[in-house]
Amino acid sequence: MTLPPKKNTDRTWIITALLLYSLAVLPTVSLADIDESEIVSPKEGWGELDIEEEEEEPLPFFVELLLWPVNRVLDLVDVVRIDVGAGTSYGGVLRITRQGSLGYRSVAPGSLRIGSFGRKPPILFEEEDEKGAGVNYKFSSDREVCDTEIGVGIDLFLAGYIGICAEGIVDFLGGIIFLDPDDDDIR
């Protein structure tokens, strides 16, 4: 019968003992023992850095006037959310603000939508499900939902959704008197 070769445990013990000895003997330095006035860089400092935000220069009034109708049309586009579609989707959703959403929509593997999605292209291929209620509602990352959206949608292979974005209405009305609450006007 042969015995297994003897492992070299003596070397391991010596290394471990040396490590423990060095930890015990070396003086410990606490951050509380260091005086900040002793820490000095040999180079001169930069001094105080003041960060100034660059302010946009306002556009000349005639340019604002020329862009006004374009921006109001775009604000109206932001208000209405309506689409129709077809695909493997089924379920429904009711939105009374983003935090008040309720529903279940399964769209796997996908649903092709055509309509008004705010300032997004009018064609959308939706691939993610939506489900839940209230703050636990999981939104599809394919579809942008505004915080104050009110709408309803039904899917049964053919689909439809209609909604309005209340914050878009506020932005449109503010834009009439040259205000831009959503900060989305063309400049």
Image (cartoon, grey):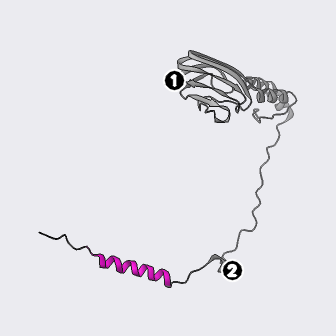
Spot occupied by residue 150 in the image (x, y as percentages of width and height)? 73, 24
Tell me which residue sits at (67%, 36%) in the image. Answer: 135
Tell me residue 61's x, y (percent).
86, 33
- Whether the magenta-drawn stretch holds residue 20 is answered as yes
Q: Position of residue 161 (x, y in %)?
A: 65, 19
What type is the residue that disc 2 sits on? Asp
Query: In the rendered view, does 92 fall on the left or right side of 88?
Result: right
Image quadrant occupied by the N terminus? bottom left
Residue 87 is left or right of residue 96, and the answer is left
Residue located 69% across and 26% down the image: 95
Number of residues whose C-alpha sits closer than 10 Å to that of mark 2, classed few (under 14), some (14–19) or many (20 or more): few
Q: How far separated are the C-alphas under marks 1 and 2?
A: 65 Å
Label 1: element kind: loop
Vertical order, 129 against 14 (above or below): above
Amino acid type, callout 1: Gly
Determine which quarter of the picture holds residue 72: top right
Check if mark 1's residue and mark 2's residue have beta carbons within 8 Å: no
Image quarter of residue 174: top right
Q: Which residue is mark 1?
A: 110
The C terminus lies in which quarter of the figure?
A: top right
**Label 1 neighbour load within 10 Å: few <14, some 14-19, many 20+:** some
Residue 174: mark in rendering: none
Q: Residue at x 82, y 31 (%)?
A: 63
In percent of width and height, residue 45 lies at 70, 71
Residue placed under numbered mark 2 in the picture: 35
Q: Main secondary structure of the magenta part?
A: helix
- Quadrant position of residue 9: bottom left
Which of pointers 1 and 2 lies earlier in the amino acid sequence? 2
Q: Is residue 152 left or right of residue 130?
A: right
| Stretch of the chain drawn in magenta | 7-24
